Image: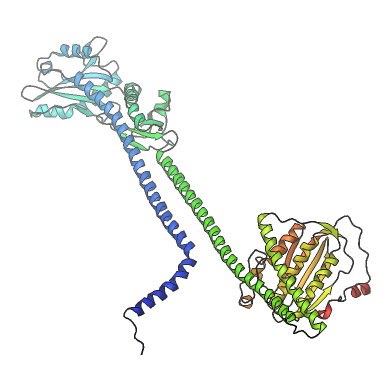
Amino acid sequence: MVVTPPGSGTRSLRAGASATMLPIVRRNTLWIGFAAVLVPLAVLLLLQYRWLTELDLTSTLAHRATLDNYLEGVTGEVRYFYRSTGERALNLPSATFTQNLFDRAARHFGKKCILGARRLFVVSFVPGGPKEPLFYDPATASLRPSLPTVAAATATVSAVEVAIAPWRTLAASGAALERPALAVDERDPAHRMLLNPITDDAAHVVGVAGMILDEDYFRQRVLPAAIRRSVPTLASREQNYDPIVTVRDRHGRTMWSSEEHDAKETRTAAFAGAAPFEVQKAFWLVFTDWRIGLRSRHGPPAQWARSTFKLNLALSAALAAALLAGLLLAMRGAAREVALSRMKTDFVSNVSHELRTPLASIRVFGELLRMGRVDSPQKVRDYGEYIEAESRRLTQLIHNILDFARIESGRKSYELVEGDLGEVVGDTLRTFAVRLRQSGFDLAYQPPPTPLPPLRFDAAALAQAMSNLLDNAVKYAGEGRQITVSLGREGHEAVLSVRDQGIGIARDQQGKIFDRFHRVSTGLVHDVKGSGLGLAIVRHIAEAHGGRVSVESRPGQGSTFSIHLPLPRLRAAAPVLLPGDAAAATASGPYGSGS
């Protein structure tokens, strides 16, 4: 009976869970780091978008408030001018009406130098006083009951009678007016009036003093002066704002504009087609049916703000995209480094195995020879061939490792000498024949139909490349035991091919097999050991000779690796062979049948 200590089962479960989770965390470290950067970046973008949106809204509201304050200042200036003028000019004593002292009223009007008035008048409601309005005549400095022209007199008198009708009715009723105040009558736009009711000590209305406003003076003097006095306020708050100030009447006609210089054209300009106001405001006290508005000379600021918002948002998005791209590139580089580190680890493991195998064979055959257990000269030669073949295999592996180190450091160089490529192929096949015979392979060689012209190449490098291709064919032959080596020409290239009948290579892996440390990730080759450098060195050697390397393969149908080397261009054309001669030239060489 086994007694389990308390809590040991829980610790075992925890240890097992930790052991299970640790590889998962290691495999997903890059993605976890990516998420750790991406999530704050996304949150930052959302916050920045919200901030820009609020800033855009706040800026628009603040800009509109500034423009409203400016228009308030202009209309306030107009209101102050006419209120102060009316109160100063129309404030007559009640004795003027009760004692018929209208000559004093005339002197009052003459002393005040009243601006902005087309006509000044008084109307008496006292019994025995004038029954019709009296108009001030600046030429004689007196009050007269008539005007220079009959038409003007009729229209003006009618307008005045209509305007004072409420006070005339109030005076006739004898009702008291407790708080008389300056009044405005604009029922007739051609006769806009300021009216001041005059009361006696008993608060009874005894008369009205009034002024008919001069519209031209308002447009040409009052408006420009009010606008000029309010401009510094707008300029101090909106430094880059270039406003166009426009005043329009009730019919939409432009009565004054900062863009216009000809007052006559301004007054008759039609509103149709005019740009809309950004903000507008009606005048107070007088000209209340006119509106003053603002718009920018360069477009509405809301549009600027929207463009600035879009620009800032685009810059933020571009910055985020750049950061994300940099992060992806960094992750890609890190992933490649991790994969490369894993490949290097596998490389060390595979190279250790590759080194142990030939060394073990050499040691075994050497011990047999040392202990004298070989009883025939033929056996001694066979064992010697085995030892030599394994030594060459070991030498080839070491050469691959050393050459790869030189290639990585940029110190690998090749000595190109003109020679016969067929001789290099033959020597390599003779060297490799022992190993192929040991492994039970049949090797067939197909020489070129016509002799190839001399090429410039590094014989040792090409022999190494061919040995790597043969070694690759042996490793991945599977159950196929036939290897075919061919040498020929295709156009302006000499082509050296090694074809096996092995397991083949999937199409998606064919572009990667020439990368360093890369090994095909299929179950069929999982147990095949190798350094992962052979094909990478083959490609480097081919490219160093101005050529290339290619592969044709289908899973389960074998593979054909070819080294393409450029032929000299200035050579005589090869002789044309008859079909019988060509067929004879393609016969198997001395390496057929596993020799």
Q: Quadrant of residue 18?
A: bottom left
Front residue of this view, candidates 152 and 51: 51
Front residue of this view, candidates 339 and 491: 339
The C terminus appears in which quarter of the rendering? bottom right
Q: Quadrant of residue 422?
A: bottom right
Front residue of this view, candidates 14 and 142: 14
Which residue is located at x 49 percent, y 67 percent? 27
| Image x and y of residue 96, in percent | 13, 16
| Image x and y of residue 239, in percent | 39, 31
Say how the picture is coloured. rainbow
Please determine whether, in this image, residue 221 is positioned above or below residue 427: above
Which residue is located at x 47 percent, y 46 percent? 315
| Image x and y of residue 216, in percent | 34, 22
The N terminus appears in which quarter of the rendering? bottom left
| Image x and y of residue 516, in percent | 65, 63
Please determine whether, in this image, residue 467 is positioned above or below residue 442: above
Front residue of this view, candidates 165 and 323: 323
